[in-house]
Every structure is written in C-alpha cells, then in structure tokens.
C-alpha cells in the first residue's frame, strides 16, 4: 500500500529525514515513533504530498507520488498535528466544505458525511460551531475530515497529543476499527507506549534515520537478546579506561555512561559467561563495587533505540 525508498529531506544544512525506506501492507497499523525533532512530521508531510523530498521515492498503491500527485492525494487521508479550523462553521458544514473541496460526488456527499459523523460520534454535535469543541472532539473532526475522501491510506500525525486518557482510548478504538475496514494506517507519536498496543508494526526513527522497523515484539526481542549490565566503580576516573576496554569486547554493545559515573552496556552472550568477564575486569584493577543486570522495559527500549536522545 505504501512504499518509501531512500527518502531524504534537507532544510538548508539540516538533514531532517535521512535515507528512510520501509513498506506497509494493506490493513496494517504502523506506529511511527521517535523523539521530538526526529523527522516524523516531515516524513508524513512528504507522503501527504505537502513537502517535496530532497531525494528518494514514495508510492501509494503502486502509484508514484511524483508522477501522479493529484491521484495519489485522492487516496490519502492526512490528519496533521496542527490544523486551522474555520471557527464559525458547524461540524457538519466543516465536513461538507471538505467534501466539496475533495470533489466527493454530489450523490455520495450526504451519506459520506452522515457515515463519518456516526463513526466519529460527531452526530450529537453536528450543529455546534467548531470553535466550541473540546480538544477530543476537535480531533474527531480532524479525523472525520481526513476520512472525507474515503482514503485507502490514513496518515495521522501525533493524534493523541493533548488528549485526556479517555479520549485516547476512544481514539485507539477508532483507529483499530478503521484498520478492520481495510484502511492502512500510519500513525506517529513521540511516546512509544501510546502506540505499542494498537500497532502491528513499528517504525522507529531518530535524527531522521530509521533505527528499527518491524513487528514490535521482534524489535523488542532483538534488543533483549542479551542482557543489560550496569557497573558502578569506586574510582570514577577509571570509567573512561573501562569503557575503552569493554568497547573492544565482541559481546559488549551500546556502552553508555550516565552523569553519576554508572556504566551500562548490553551483554550479548549467555549470562553464564558474564562472571568470567567480571573476574577479568576485577583482576585488571577496576574498582567495581556494584554490578546488576536486568531486562529492558518498554521505555528503556525506546531510550535505547533512540540512543537516549529523548528530550
Ligand atoms: N520547514 C522547516 N524548515 C527548517 N527546518 C525544519 C522545517 N520543518 C522541520 N524542520 C526541522 O526538521 C527536523 C525534524 O522536524 P519534524 O519532522 O517536525 O520532527 P518530529 O515531527 O519528529 O518532531 C527538526 O530539527 C525541525 O526543526
Ligand atoms: Mg511532529
């Protein structure tokens, strides 16, 4: 349904999206996760034909976005993170306006709008002006607008941001039922846990680059192959030397040092082999006074795959 190849976007000297490639099948819900500034909005805007890539290609349902942007646009629904409303319009008029803008045939328009209002639960407030709506209701309207052309691919940019917990649950339900109806959904968030339970796939990016793509369980499993080990040294001045020694070990990966001098790394070998390594380090004179290991929690996974650049 969606194929992205080597997608790149520069803003002057800044490479906001860097050689991104992935593919989504029909009916998938793919979470698009990365810290603020990772390049999610830029990527989504390029897929939605609102931003021109510096390099790379995008195709939707086999149609190239560059050969036929107008046709592609008709099969995409885009729910931006910020959008202007016409505050004085009622919900119904608002959807009507967009239905006309998208040239939904006259004979279809009324039933399309009715179905969308029913689906998003906007019926009760059809006659209310847009400006009077709560954030949750505005998001429903934003979703309704994105559905007005009955798109095959729905792109949602941080739709849960700013919603209260109840509205989030409702949004999740709407997203799931759209996928059940065969829509392909690409949905972003800077909070991994927000998407983990509804998405069958995840694309994780950081600094414009893909860090992981696939089923979330697989991503998690890949990261968990191995154990996370944390060491504390009595003499903090030994930390750089320890870091150097560890970095030369084949089974030690992703070493990081926190400001308190704790050194953490992933040990990608059987845990039973770890005592040997520890013994060697002690024999080499490192003043290790604490050593612990643990599995990776979901937030940890996120921090790891984005190299801790969650800001
Ligand atoms: N129009 C623009 N001009 C210049 N820089 C931009 C523009 N849009 C986004 N950026 C920069 O590109 C990077 C990625 O931004 P964005 O795609 O909005 O990230 P995200 O949605 O993941 O938070 C950021 O460093 C941002 O400042
Ligand atoms: Mg964004």
Image: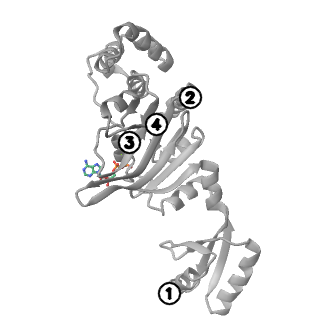
Q: Nearer the viewer, mark 1 or mark 2?
A: 2
Q: Quadrant of residue 265?
A: bottom right
Q: CA distance from mark 1 to mark 2?
A: 53 Å
Mark 4 or mark 1, whichever is nearer to me: 4
**Which residue bears the numbered disc 4?**
160
Pointer 1 residue: 237
Q: CA distance from mark 3 to mark 2?
A: 22 Å
State yes or no: discs 1 and 2 in contact (Cβ < 8 Å).
no
Distance, label 3 to label 4, CA atoms, is 16 Å
* N-term-proximal mark, 4 vs 2: 4
Towards the viewer: 311 or 140: 140
Residue beneath disc 3: 44
- Picture layout, residue 27 above or below residue 103: below
Label 2 residue SS: helix
Circles 4 and 1, Cβ within 8 Å, touching? The answer is no
Disc 4 on helix, strand or loop?
Answer: loop
Residue beneath label 2, please? Answer: 173
């Amino acid at each position: 349904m969606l194929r992205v190849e080597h997608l790149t976007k520069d803003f002057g000297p800044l490479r906001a999206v860097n050689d991104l490639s992935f593919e989504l099948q029909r009916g998938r819900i793919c979470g698009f996760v990365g810290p603020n500034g990772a390049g999610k909005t830029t990527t989504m805007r390029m897929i939605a034909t609102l931003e021109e890539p510096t390099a790379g290609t995008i195709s939707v349902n086999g149609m190239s976005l560059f050969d036929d942007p107008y046709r592609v646009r008709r099969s995409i629904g885009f729910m931006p993170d910020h959008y202007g409303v016409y505050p004085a319009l009622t919900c119904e008029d608002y959807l009507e306006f967009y239905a006309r803008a998208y040239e939904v045939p006259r004979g279809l328009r009324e039933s399309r709008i009715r179905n969308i209002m029913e689906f998003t639960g906007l019926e009760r407030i059809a006659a209310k002006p847009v400006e009077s709506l709560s954030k949750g209701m505005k998001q429903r309207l934003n979703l309704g607008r994105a559905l007005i052309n009955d798109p095959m691919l729905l792109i949602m940019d941080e739709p849960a941001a700013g919603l209260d917990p109840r509205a989030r649950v409702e949004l999740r339900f709407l997203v799931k039922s759209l996928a059940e109806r065969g829509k392909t959904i690409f949905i972003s968030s800077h909070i991994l846990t927000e998407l983990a339970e509804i998405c069958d796939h995840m694309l994780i990016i950081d600094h414009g680059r893909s860090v992981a793509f696939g089923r979330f369980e697989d991503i998690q499993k890949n990261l968990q192959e191995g154990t996370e080990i944390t060491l504390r040294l009595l003499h903090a001045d030994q930390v750089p030397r320890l870091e150097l020694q560890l970095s030369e070990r084949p089974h030690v990966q992703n070493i990081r040092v926190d400001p308190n001098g704790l050194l953490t790394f992933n040990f990608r070998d059987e845990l039973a082999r770890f005592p040997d390594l520890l013994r060697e380090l002690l024999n080499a004179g490192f003043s290790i006074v604490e050593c612990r290991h643990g599995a990776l929690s979901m937030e940890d996974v996120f921090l790891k795959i984005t190299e801790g650049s969650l800001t």
